């Protein structure tokens, strides 16, 4: 619900939103909200079946931003 509330506040739609998440529950919540997810795993890495659904899995925020730049070019 928090991701959907954030979209509503920003006048965005879930399908046009990318969530950066590090936790298994956060990745799952974003996917259930019909949002793309870039996962930057932290101490507890989401299970493979969750990671496979992510748009991208990055080692850190710099790698995540490089991925986004590559998609926009």
Image (tube, helix red, strand yellow):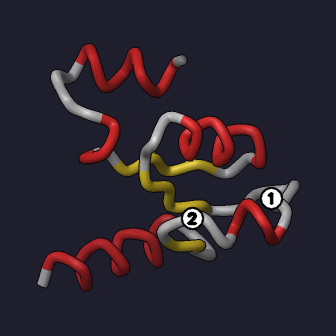
Residue 54, given in percent of the width and then of the height, sits at 57, 64
Query: What is the tally of numbered marks visible in this picture?
Result: 2
Residue 7 x %, y %: 31, 25
| Numbered disc 2: secondary structure | loop
Compared with 38, 23 (above or below) is above
**Quadrant housing residue 51:** bottom right
Along the line of sight, which residue is nearer the eye, 3 or 61?
3
Residue at point 81%, 71% (across, down): 48
Please, is residue 71 above or below residue 15 in the view?
A: below
Q: Residue at x 42, y 23 (%)?
A: 4
Q: Quadrant of the C terminus?
A: bottom left
Left or right of 71 in this view: 29: right
Which quarter of the image is occupied by the N terminus? Answer: top right
In this image, 38 relative to 12: left or right?
right
In primary-sequence order, the first of circles 2 and 1 is 1
Q: Which residue is mark 2?
A: 54
Label 2, label 1: how many angstroms apart (C-alpha)? 10 Å
How crowded is the residue under tag 2: few (<14 C-alpha within 10 Å), some, or many (20+)? many
Q: Secondary structure at mark 1?
A: loop
Q: Report crowding for label 1: few under 14, some 14 to 19, many 20 or more residues within 10 A (C-alpha).
A: many
Residue 67 in the image, given as x and y percentages of width and height: 36, 79
Query: Residue 21's spot in the image, x, y percent?
Result: 59, 49
Residue that badge 1 annotates: 46
The answer to whether residue 52 is left or right of residue 63 is: right
Q: Compared to 44, does 12 lie above or below?
A: above
**Residue 42 in the image: above or below residue 52:** above
Residue found 16% across the figure and 76% down from its top: 72
- Do the numbered discs 2 and 1 sit on residues whose CB atoms are within 8 Å? yes
Relative placement, left or right, of 30 versus 65 is: right
Q: Residue at x 30, y 45 (%)?
A: 15
């Amino acid at each position: 619900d928090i991701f959907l509330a954030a979209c509503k506040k920003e006048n965005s739609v879930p399908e046009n939103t990318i969530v950066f998440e590090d936790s298994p529950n956060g990745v799952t919540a974003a996917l259930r909200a019909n949002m793309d997810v870039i996962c930057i795993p932290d101490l507890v890495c989401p299970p493979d079946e969750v990671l496979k659904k992510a748009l991208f899995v990055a080692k850190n925020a710099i790698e995540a931003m490089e991925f986004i730049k590559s998609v926009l070019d």
